[in-house]
Image (cartoon, coloured by chain):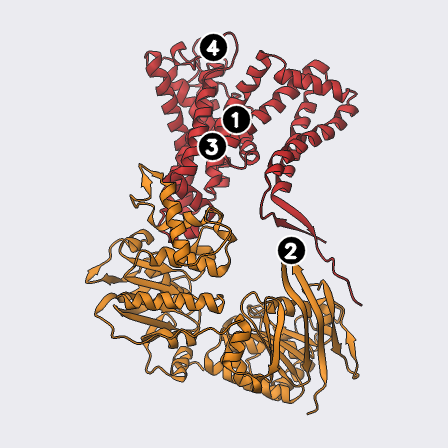
Chain colours: A orange, B red
Amino acid sequence: MEASTVLRLKGLTKRFGPILANDDITIELQKGEVLALLGENGAGKTTLMNMLFGHYLPDSGNIEIKRTDDNLVPLELGDPSAALAAGIGMVHQHFTLAENITAFENITLGAESLFSLRRNQKKAQTKIKSIMSHSGLDAPLDIPVGKLSVGERQRVEILKALYRDAHILVLDEPTAVLTPQEADSLFSNLRRMTNQGLSVIFITHKMREVLSFSDRLVVLRDGKNVGSMKTSDASEKKIARLMVGSETQKVSSKRIKPGGPILSLNEISVAGQSKRDSLHDVNLILNSNEILGIAGISGNGQNVLADLISGLVAPDRGSIVLKGVAIENISPFNMIKSGFGRIPEDRHRQGIVGGLSVSENMIIERLDDPQIQNFGFLRSSVINKNAKTLSEKYDVRGPGIDQASRLLSGGNIQKLILARVFEKQPEIILANQPTRGLDMGAASEVQKHLIEARDRGGGVILISEDLDEILGLADRIVVMRDGKLHDAISNSREDIGLMMAGDST
Amino acid sequence: MIRIEPREKISNSSTVLIPIIAAVVSLLFAAIPLLAAGANPFVAYVEMAKGVFGSVFAISEMLTRATPLIYTGLAAAIAFRAKLWNIGAEGQLYLGAIAAVTVGSGFFDLPAVLLLPLIIVLGGCAGAVGMAAPTYLKVRFGADEVVTTLLLNFIIIIFLQMLLEGPLQDPMGLGWPQSAPILDQGMFPPLIDRMRIHSGLILAVLLAVIAHFMIKYSVWGFKLRAVGENSAAAKHAGININRSLFGVALLSGGLAGLAGVSEVAGLKGYLTADLSPGFGYAGIVVAMLAGLSPLGVLIASVFIASVFVGADSMSRAMGISSFLADLVVSVSLLCVLVGGFISKFKIVRAGTGKRVK
């Protein structure tokens, strides 16, 4: 296939207040090509795609797109309907489907004229069927979207874009919610479509996908295009260097021999509001000197498990036994007292009180500690000294320890939480998605602390959706599915992926 | 297109300047209805200033008016800090006043050193109970405290009217719906001879200072701030949210109850159903103006009391309708609130980029 440019982003710049989100970015997309857009969180990927799709108006620069004839014509900026009309389809990370109507209705929704009296269902059906057979994308059309699996919903999203005659498809983190097998099938379908002339931009930070699937890649850092190359010329090291500006080492844990069991969950059941927040007869044993990885697709009960160990949820049945003694009165306070360190999934919502200062957040879990109070009054000198020491030790950077903690960046908020948790040398650590959304530097810092905690005799429960992280860190892996835990039959990516998916795929 | 963004840093000069500018602008705005009523705004404002600061008596009247506002302002500020929306200060004020006249009008014949503290404590407790009940409903059943506290105000006032025509009615009162007077030894001592200003003001200022230190420096205050700022994180960190909320509820209700005690045992001497011209609701405005800071409540109370008292004396001196006084009050409140908003947020014009066809 001859290469011809279908899309050209020229000198796009976007500023949000003092932050330069996109700085003079120029990217070209060829027909039939898969372009991977890489970058850490906050590198400007989403801003760029939002400008392409007309959600944001660029401060300067323009976009040219190929129409039916062979010329590139400028796209009207800041107008999503112009982007749609020009054949740009976007699949967001969080799906934009109405769950109570069928896939067919979702696909055709908005694509029909408001003024036609009768829907031409037959024509639409035929068109969707033909798209499905050409692309290999398959999804049940006539049951409500709410009943479809995540993979099926994603296919519906893509069908929706193709139904609107998209010839450029933008996918934002398409594999975040998929099992490895589902991801592979998505990629093979996309490949089939690009062979028929579709062009694809996909946003990701997973190296493996970029290297095995894309034709060309563009790396963004701090809002700039810092490198574009053919995937065949790229290597993991090279990309990592571009993404962070320097080479970082991947943290991998040296296995050590686990000690005896320190924590066990026995036959725990929690009846939640829905399947997502229920547990069924969960048994789990955590040893000292061990990192236990809990793999699974999100929404399979990991959050209830985390809430349970954090003390936020009490089990309906079963017991939590810590070193041979069952914990009575499960509450966050008692769990902290018993020696649990908890790193919550949502660090902004559960981890810190944004309006309180950095130093106050560093002592929020030890308000009853006589060291920090005198007759119910806080000893600010001790608290400030503590904050200074911990900020240095854990490298928490921000506008100052007396400033509101919400002013810190995500990585520094996580370091604040680490400082608070690890300084108490907890015997048991629950880390729920501890590196999600962090840049590589901060992520490897977090992982180092988890390994250190294990090496000095602690037990770590690591819940993560990033299978690579679990494979790299965990001494033992269990898989969570539908509120149940299953021991991994092996440590291979394929086996665990199959277990994550269960029998339904 | 415009957007509103929070300011990252609030400059010191703007925290001082903006309220002053807002006050000046409010005077300009209020001049319009004054002109329409045929009054000279200049003369009117001079009368207003005289009515507030023209004499020791004027100042004392203004501070007398500010006293209940400090109590109710503190009640709202503390509750709102913990995101507990106590709209029921008006009702709790009356509960405090009912308790005060019940024990103070001859039930116990005690010396002043005992009777006044007893009245204060029981009045505070009555107010506290008035807020504890809606808080229990909130914690136990998830009932919205905005609704329950607000509706409780009306229930309490009707209950009071019933009491004033029944068990609490003054036998010597010629059938008027008013309570028996509080014994002399149960009254707050006056601060200045032959003026209405009383030592309830001293207690109010003292409580504001204590509240400031408690919120800023105590573990209790830390918990209150944490719960108000982010209750999910506070809970995760092991803070007992319900216990904190109950503590705040008792304190907030108690302070509102003290407003009633102070009015009844400091000013009126007996209880009628029109004891408060909406001090409970005005306390919410005071708290918002004060940015929920207890020390700010002192300043905001003085400001609001000045506008009330000044506008009253202006309408009396100029012979213009007292509704105009209410209008001046409202306009100046709006201006100060808008000014406070501008000091915290900035308005950004979005979409300055070129539109390329």
Using a 10 Å C-alpha cutoff, classify the residue at mark 3 as few (fewer than 14 neighbours), some (14 to 19) or many (20 or more).
Answer: many
Dot 2 surroundings within 10 Å: few (below 14), some, or many (20 or more)? few
The chain to which mark 1 is attached is B
- Numbered disc in front, either 3 or 2: 2
Judge whether residue B187 can be spotted in this image: yes
Mark 3 or 4, closer to the camera: 3
Q: Secondary structure at mark 3?
A: helix
Q: Quadrant of residue B21?
A: top right
Residue linked to disc 2: A17
Q: Earlier in the sequence, mark 3 or mark 4?
A: 3
Q: Quadrant of residue A169?
A: bottom right
Q: Which residue is mark 1?
A: B69
Query: Which element carries disc 2, helix, strand or loop?
Result: loop
* Dot 1 or dot 4, earlier in sequence: 1
Closer to the camera, A438 or A448? A448
Amino acid beneath label 3: Ala
Same subunit: marks 1 and 4: yes
Disc 4 residue crowd, few under 14, some 14–19, many 20+, Cα 10 Å = few
Q: Which residue is mark 4?
A: B173
A477 or B245: nearer the viewer? A477
Residue that badge 3 annotates: B75
Q: Are marks 3 and 2 in contact (CB under 8 Å)?
A: no
Contact (Cβ within 8 Å) of mark 1 with mark 3: no
* Chain letter for the residue marked with disc 3 in the picture: B
Tell which circle, 1 or 3, labels the residue nearer the N-terminal end.
1
Whole-angstrom CA distance, mark 1 to mark 4, is 29 Å
